[in-house]
Image (cartoon, grey):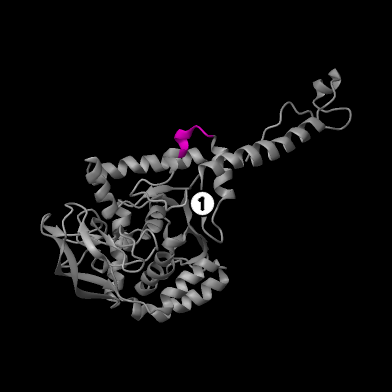
Amino acid sequence: MCGTDEYGTATETKALEEGLSCQEICDKYHAVHKAVYEWFGCSFDKFGRTPTRAQTEICQGLFQDLWQAGNINEQVMEQLYSEAAGKFLADRFVSGTCPKCGYEDARGDQCDKCGGLMNPTDLLNPRCKLTGTKPVIRSTKHLFLDLPKLSDKLQAYIDTTSQLGGWSANCVQVTSAWMRDGLKQRCITRDLKWGIPVPLEGYRDKVFYVWFDAPVGYISITANYTDQWQQWWQSPEDVELVQFMGKDNVPFHTVIFPASLLGSGRPWTMMKNISVTEYLNYEGGKFSKSRGTGVFGTDAVETGIPVEVWRYYLLANRPEAQDTDFKWADLQARNNNELLKNLGNFINRRARRFEPCTRLSCAASGVCCAGWQWQHQATLWL
């Protein structure tokens, strides 16, 4: 199962940039992502998306279970408000200086440089990305997932599953840091229009925070694939769930989403195995979709470089244990030296060694008198 999670401020920001509606921008880029995966030769039982009826129903149902179990709290919080735009600013409509590392262009939810998570009000020298003005702080009411209350259940799950599933060292390290520092209540609502509506009186003008609803996409995409989805997602004794991601997404998949499932009281299938990579950097800096820094799927397609070369280079350069760097010069060198010279020369030697004899009887039968199978050509698959 795979797909595109399409709600949140990133979508609203991109839609504003391109002069499209949120639905139009999602339709456009879902098709782009799907085409890139097909070009790379990646296949899925279902490549779906989150703006579906199943996503809304399952996400709202999960919230209602958490609410009824007493695992959701209401709190008044301070939030940045743009007087020029006349509205509260969601995370990615704010940028400023990261309080942890000093990076001057951090987003309101996460710093691209150090990876630290934060609230918009934590930023130093904040500015509204819509108007360029300095926002003010106002009070507003939101809903919070009570992570401290769920901490014991979550720790038991982490202790058991990280051993059984053989979680990678970087995954264990990130997860342990979150648990060691003490879990805090996590806001799960936002003042946006593009998202899943909160089904609670007093909050119907708000939507769920994208990182509350996005992991539900794994479930809803399965539900859109088969009406027997509960046999997969509510059958923990019979199903083993494996996930793949970069380390910046670890807390959402090992802490926040598992806590949500545990707190619902239902027998959800929980993630067991997880493959986590370090960062793949770009020419000594960070990849950034929002800033257009890096080489992305559509760029790879447009280079004209065969997909087999891309697959080889990305796997050979996969950041398994430490950060690695994408460099165009390195891609060229690996193609010319490792694929063309080393592997190509090896294949050429083997193909020449097993050339069949030229006797007509052997060619007609397809089997050489020396016992070799007749080979018309050698094909290399990477």
Can the viewer see residue 317? Answer: yes
Spot occupied by residue 45 in the image (x, y as percentages of width and height): 48, 48
Q: Is residue 251 rendered to the left or right of residue 162? A: left
Residue at (42, 77) in percent of width and height: 179
Examine the structure image and report whether residue 150 is included in the region drawn in magenta: no
Residue situated in front as seen by the camera: 65 or 98: 98
Q: Secondary structure at mark 1?
A: strand
Which residue ends up furthest to the top in the rendered image?
A: 360
Q: Is residue 21 rendered to the left or right of residue 179? A: left
Position of the C terminus, as image quadrant, is top right
282 relative to 183, above or below: above
Magenta segment, which residues? 300-305
Q: Magenta segment, principal secondary structure?
A: helix
Residue at (23, 53) in percent of width and height: 194
Q: Is residue 44 rendered to the left or right of residue 185? A: right
Residue at (81, 28) in percent of width and height: 355
**Hey, what amino acid is under mark 1?**
Asp
Q: Quadrant of residue 184?
A: bottom left
Examine the structure image and report whether residue 304 is included in the region drawn in magenta: yes
Residue situated in front as seen by the camera: 144 or 70: 144
Residue situated in front as seen by the camera: 47 or 17: 17
Spot occupied by residue 11 in the image (x, y as percentages of width and height): 28, 50
Can the viewer see residue 373? Answer: no
Few, some or many residues within 10 Å of mark 1 (<14, 14–19, 20+): some
Q: Which residue is mark 1?
A: 325
Spot occupied by residue 370 in the image (x, y as percentages of width and height): 89, 30
